[in-house]
Image (cartoon, grey):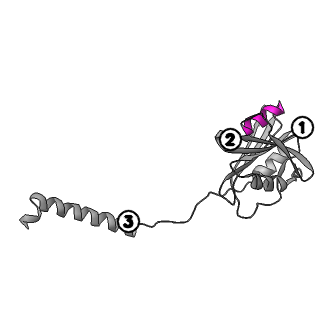
Amino acid sequence: MGRFTQGIYGYVFAVLVCLAGAGLFLLVTPQSRTEHIPRVNYSIDQANAARAATYEIVSPREVLPDWVPNSSTLTDEGGAVTWRLGFATAQRQHAMLAQSDERPLDDFANRMANTDKATGSRDINGETWQERIRQDKNQRSLVRILPDRTVVVTGTADWAELTALAESLVAQPRPAATVSATS
């Protein structure tokens, strides 16, 4: 036993014991090979946005196939209601729907698109959307500036996926006021 605890044999033996322990640990530790994208239920933010906004909220008719809604943020600052809804697309890129009545409307569009330069336009469901590109951020945006609000579809997704998101948008009705019964 003395020769395993002294000299070079001792070092080699200690290294082998450590490697065997690490290998055993890796063998018994569960490992997931599946992708995990957190999914959010945005229906509460959607209803609250429709209730709080003075403008007509739009949202996807339904979640597009293989897309995952992964973020939803609703803010009401200074009377401007802003709702941002993010997705992981089928190609696992990012796409976001952002809408607000923040004034000036152009500033909101410029901030969401990270550029104020329109590079073209696209007809989607009979409506004209501005195309904007920010090459250094790999960001493409579709922008609609309306009299009462701005709607932006943006992200690292390609034009086809951003267009599919814009095509899926439908106006959301205002939720009915809740009636409380008092006895």
Query: Where does the N terminus fall, quadrant-wise?
Result: bottom left
Dot 1 amino acid type: Asp
* Distance (Cα) linking label 1 and label 2: 29 Å
What's the residue at 79%, 37% (across, down)? 109
Query: Residue 134, how many percent across, how many down?
Result: 70, 39
- Looking at this view, is 176 or 141 the one in front? 141
Query: Residue 166, how many percent across, how many down?
Result: 82, 52
**Residue where numbered disc 1 is placed:** 148
Magenta stretch, residue numbers? 102-113
**Residue where numbered disc 2 is placed:** 135
Q: In which quarter of the image is residue 36?
A: bottom right
SS majority, magenta: helix
* Distance (Cα) linking label 3 and label 1: 58 Å
Q: Which residue lies furthest to the left in this view?
A: 2
What's the residue at 75%, 55% (across, down)? 161
- Looking at this view, is 72 or 154 the one in front? 154
Q: Quick one: SS at disc 2?
A: helix
Dot 3 amino acid type: Leu
